[in-house]
Image (cartoon, rainbow, N blue to C red):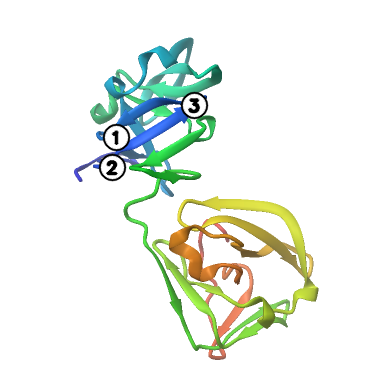
Amino acid sequence: MDAANRGRVRVERTGKRVRTYLGGRVVADTTRALLVWEIPYYPAYYIPLEDVDQGALKETGTGKHSPSRGEAVVYTVTAGGKQAAEAALAYPESPLEEIRGHVRFDWDSMDAWFEEDEEVFFHPRDPYTRVDILPSSRRVRVEVDGVTVADSVRPRILFETGLPARYYLPKTDITFDVLESTATATHCPYKGTAEYWSVNGHADLAWSYRTPLPESQKIAGLVSFYNEKVDIYVDEVLQERPRTKFS
């Protein structure tokens, strides 16, 4: 990989084959995609115009401005009898030279995305993010408002780049009568879709991946709590609450 930066935007090349579909048709197919970190948390794909079905793009006549990327040409994407309005952007005169001649498709507007032959969900994987899930015999106890709501000596600890360690606990080690299921769901390209519970009236403090993606199967059905919002004791040592975007 090689990288370039402008302000907070980082650009890197990836050797993965990247494809996106709409209406059952391939709209873009490339082995020359760029990863562009428009926000710090994960990248977006920018695809060379030559690797895009030109018949699928129609300029809308409107534009968008980005302080870092410049003036955008906006496209509606049409393929297979399906239309995605204003679902693609290009920056032909961008101060970021690397992204000139590339198109960025709105991830959620497309029907499917593939890296090589594996479907990818929610957003591109960050090559600098690693997820390790390790079994542990350390005692993990969770308190909410001074009341113990979970106590386990068989946690699985998930270490994910850029985030605090997360302690995933068996449901049988949790006092479930203080948990109330909510309608919240979040999505992760490494772990899958999470369901949430409120705890003693505090919204969405706990979550679980009922059917995680293959690389995260070790946490299937286990429950974790936001370190940022509860008191977690590891071997009876109170852990400092981390400061993250979830705080």
Find out whether the residues at labels 2 and 3 contact each other: C-beta distance under 8 Å.
no
| Mark number displayed over residue 16 | 2
- In this rendering, the answer to whether 103 lies above or below 59 is below
Residue 87 got which mark?
Answer: none
Label 3, secondary structure: give it: strand
Residue name at image x 44 percent, y 44 percent: 119
Q: Position of residue 3 (x, y in %)?
A: 22, 43
Can you tell which quarter of the image residue 133 is in?
bottom left
Mark 3 residue type: Leu
Q: Is residue 21 above or below residue 170?
A: above
| Residue at disc 1, secondary structure | loop
- The residue wearing badge 3 is 22
In primary-sequence order, the first of circles 2 and 3 is: 2
Going by the numbered disc 2, the residue's amino acid type is Lys
- Name the quadrant containing residue 38: top left
Question: Which residue appears at 49% of the width and 27% of the height?
Answer: 24
Say which residue appears at 30% left-offset and 24% top-offset: 51
Q: Residues within 10 Å of mark 1 (few under 14, many from 20)?
A: many
Left-right relation of 97 to 149: left
Q: Quarter holding the C terminus?
A: bottom right
Q: Nearer the viewer, mark 1 or mark 2?
A: 2
User: Badge 2, how many Cα within 10 Å: few under 14, some, many 20+?
Assistant: some
Q: Are marks 1 and 2 in contact (CB under 8 Å)?
A: yes
- The residue where tag 1 is placed is 33
Residue 127, percent from left and from top: 32, 52
Residue at the far bottom: name it.
236
What is the CA distance from the residue labelled 1 to the residue labelled 2? Answer: 8 Å
| Mark closer to the chain start, 1 or 3 | 3
Q: Secondary structure at mark 2?
A: loop
